[in-house]
Image: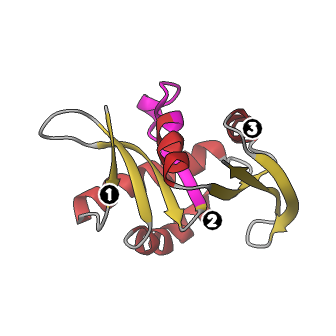
Amino acid sequence: MKIEHLQHPTTHQLDQLMTIWLSGNLTAHDFVSADYWRQQAPLVREALQSAELIVGLTDGPEAYILGFIGLQNDYIAGIFICNDAQHQGLGTALLATAQADYHQLQLNVYVANRPAIAFYHYHGFRVIDQASDQATQQSEYTMQWQR
């Protein structure tokens, strides 16, 4: 597995990213309507084209994406890992790459997503605020990491 920065993803790469994104949201956020995630897909696909992406790829000439972290400046829009690659250290490797690139990172995470909160706490993030996501009516934390 290798970690790379990806700029201007191809259509094929966008397809891979979107498959991972949708599957990840449906699995991790089963407390939010599946229709909500499907409706967001066109906007996310567009946003991915201009986001800073750090991807985890399989080795070899036909490398495919196993997971990614999407950033907008120092804001983590999300970390998504395909089901087959979860719990193998890829999320940690992607986050470590982002932490090496930035002095500070921030993100929002649903309070109901306890595994994600534990993951971010483990990697040095702390809760700095709590609010309600207007689109989903879910409570969410704003978490921050600083070097």
Q: Estimate how packed mark 1 is, as few (under 14), some (14 to 19) or many (20 or more) residues with alpha carbons within 10 Å.
A: some
Which of 71/32 is in front? 71
Which of 137/10 is in front? 10
In x, y percent, where is residue 14? 32, 61
Q: Which mark is residue 93?
A: none
Q: Are marks 2 and 3 in contact (CB under 8 Å)?
A: no
Which residue lies at the image location 71% right of the left edge and 35% below the top edge? 115
Q: Could you tell me which secondary element the residue under label 2 belongs to?
A: helix
| Left or right placement of residue 96 versus residue 114 in this view | left
**Height in image: 89 above or below 126?**
above
Q: Which residue type carries mark 2?
A: Tyr
Which of 8/40 is in front? 8
Q: Could you tell me which secondary element the residue under label 3 belongs to?
A: helix
In x, y percent, where is residue 86? 49, 30
Q: Residue 142 in magenta? A: no
Q: Earlier in the sequence, mark 2 or mark 3?
A: 2
Q: Earlier in the sequence, mark 1 or mark 2?
A: 1
Which residue lies at the image location 43% right of the left edge and 63% below the top edge? 52
Instruction: Quickly name the residue at label 2.
Output: 36
Discs 1/2, front:
1
Q: Which residue type carries mark 1?
A: Leu
What is the magenta range? 76-92
Instruction: Quickly name the residue at label 1.
Output: 6
Instruction: Quickly name the residue at label 3.
Output: 121
Q: Which residue type carries mark 3?
A: His
Distance from Cα at disc 3 to Cα at disc 1? 26 Å
In x, y percent, where is residue 110? 76, 53
